[in-house]
Image (cartoon, rainbow, N blue to C red):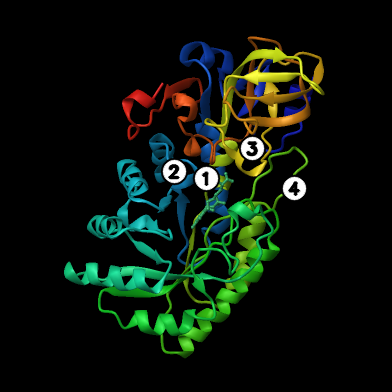
């Protein structure tokens, strides 16, 4: 009975839970969603989103000038963004597409932060046109181009300089962003002189510095080390005569994917930030993604075959790496449980139908015993799940459903070509 036993160990309010042996999302049985919408389907819980969104905000909102900008890349679904806008979130964006998403969802332009190492002139112009609240500059030339574009419009672009603090975030190499060899931000040693030059430009309203050292951080120590370096930089910039009013501390807080994972709570994170930034005298911006949306989603799938394998049986499900890329890309783990939990378990390798050996969700895992036709879920897919989906193998993008209490709605992806939407 691994599914039921595993889920009963979860802490905090439970939005995906068994009732009479069937897994529910809030008050809607997943069997009903599968019958109505088909599988695979990404299912989000509005209650879980509200809970995580409020928990993070509660942890940081007492900090001076605190602003929370949800990292849209984690979950750009318009209904999700709308819900977060209602909870007081702005948006951290990295492309013109994400800008449109954030604006479509009703986010205030003033609450939008534009990060990203390769913003095009067109994207910078569109963001200026939209009057977004903050540009995070990732290289000096970007600042010069933005200054020119802003000056041409008779405005000054509110900007921070993103600094690379050269700290090892202790996370997967592909999602680490704050080591000197990474492409993000400017080297901290070069930041003061560069800041001096950028601050001279008429078209920029340079207000401070930003950083983001990586994602799925399971320890606060690297964040604290990076923040201390940024604190020293703030005082150095003030000694050089600059007025520093804002620091953007990025995102990165990890969440549990295995039941035994231990990660810092948002409250512990907020307490660390309060301690480290006490003397800074600036407003703080946060860019959380995963910690807000991750636990609010599951991927509902159906078992197509149980196939004999050399070491373990293969459970071939109808979801694949094009629906959930994290296991194939980072070797990431997403718990698997049956929607109708029986009493038996089995050891199996879970795989999708895509023609790649890497389309595997777990090798030799102990899971609920499932049979052909059974429904099952991958847990904790609300962040970087549907967001990273592709139509590889000409598989249609899977639908997304938002459950709120006893109601559920298909919350489509308006920006995607109609022929790609299931
Ligand atoms: C600049 C920036 N901000 C915020 C985030 C959000 O990170 P997370 O989802 O780990 O909170 C990312 C992704 O790592 C990012 O690149
Ligand atoms: N896509 C990554 C996170 C990347 C964060 C973006 N900087 C993941 O699924 O874990």
- Return the x and y of residue 164 as percentages of the image width and height: 54, 69
Give me the C-alpha separation between circle 1 and circle 3: 25 Å
Residue shown at the point (40%, 45%) measured from the top left: 85
- For the residue pair 78 and 108, the one nearer the viewer reads as 78
Mark positioned earlier in the residue sequence (1 or 3): 1
Give me the C-alpha separation between circle 2 and circle 4: 26 Å
Residue 262, which numbered label?
Answer: 4
- For the residue pair 393 and 82, the one nearer the viewer reads as 393
Residue shown at the point (64%, 31%) measured from the top left: 379
Residue shown at the point (72%, 16%) measured from the top left: 341
For the image, the number of numbered tags is: 4
Reply above or below: 377 against 232.
above
The residue identified by callout 2 is 84
Closest to the camera, between mark 2 and mark 4, is 4
The residue identified by callout 3 is 327
Mark positioned earlier in the residue sequence (2 or 4): 2
- Return the x and y of residue 94 as percentages of the image width and height: 41, 53
The residue identified by callout 1 is 53
- Return the x and y of residue 419 as percentages of the image width and height: 34, 23
Closest to the camera, between mark 3 and mark 4, is 3
Mark positioned earlier in the residue sequence (1 or 2): 1
Q: Splitting the image into 4 quarters, where does residue 324 fall?
A: top right
- Asked if the residue at tag 2 contacts the one at tag 1, i.e. Cβ–Cβ closer than 8 Å, the answer is yes
Mark positioned earlier in the residue sequence (3 or 4): 4
């Amino acid at each position: 009975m691994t599914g039921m036993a595993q889920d009963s160990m979860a802490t905090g309010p439970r939005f995906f839970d068994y009732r009479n042996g069937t897994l529910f999302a809030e008050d809607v049985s997943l069997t009903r969603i599968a019958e109505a919408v088909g599988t695979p389907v990404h299912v989000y819980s509005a209650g879980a989103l509200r809970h995580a969104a409020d928990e993070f905000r509660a942890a940081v909102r007492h900090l001076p000038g605190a602003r929370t900008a949800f990292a849209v890349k984690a979950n750009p679904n318009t209904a999700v963004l709308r819900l977060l806008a209602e909870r007081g979130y702005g948006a951290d964006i990295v492309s013109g597409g994400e800008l449109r998403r954030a604006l479509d969802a009703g986010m205030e332009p003033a609450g939008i932060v534009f990060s990203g190492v390769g913003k095009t002139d067109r994207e910078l112009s569109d963001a200026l046109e939209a009057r977004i609240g903050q540009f995070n500059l990732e290289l000096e030339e970007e600042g010069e181009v933005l200054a020119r574009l802003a000056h041409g419009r008779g405005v000054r672009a509110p900007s921070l300089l993103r600094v690379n603090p050269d700290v090892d975030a202790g996370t997967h190499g592909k999602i680490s962003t704050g080591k000197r060899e990474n492409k993000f931000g400017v080297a901290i040693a070069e930041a003061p002189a560069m800041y001096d030059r950028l601050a001279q430009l008429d078209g920029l309203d340079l207000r401070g510095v930003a950083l983001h050292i990586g994602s799925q951080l399971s320890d606060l120590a690297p964040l604290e080390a990076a923040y201390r370096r940024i604190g020293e930089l703030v005082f150095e910039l003030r000694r050089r005569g600059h007025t520093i009013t804002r620091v953007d501390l990025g995102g990165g807080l990890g969440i549990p994917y295995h039941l035994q994972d231990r990660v810092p709570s948002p409250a512990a994170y907020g307490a660390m930030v309060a301690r480290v930034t006490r003397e800074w005298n600036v407003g703080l911006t946060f860019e959380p993604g995963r910690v807000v949306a991750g636990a609010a989603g599951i991927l509902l799938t159906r078992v197509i075959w149980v196939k004999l394998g050399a070491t373990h049986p293969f459970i071939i499900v109808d979801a694949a790496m094009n629906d959930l890329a994290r296991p194939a890309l980072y070797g990431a783990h997403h718990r698997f449980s049956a929607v109708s939990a029986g009493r038996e378990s089995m050891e199996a390798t879970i795989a999708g139908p895509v023609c790649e050996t890497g389309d595997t969700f777990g090798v030799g895992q102990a899971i609920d015993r499932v049979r052909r036709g059974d429904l099952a879920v991958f847990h904790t897919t609300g962040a970087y799940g549907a967001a990273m989906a592709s139509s590889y193998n000409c598989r249609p993008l899977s639908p997304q459903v938002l459950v709120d209490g006893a109601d559920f709605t298909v919350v489509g992806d308006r920006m995607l070509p109609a022929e790609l939407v299931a």
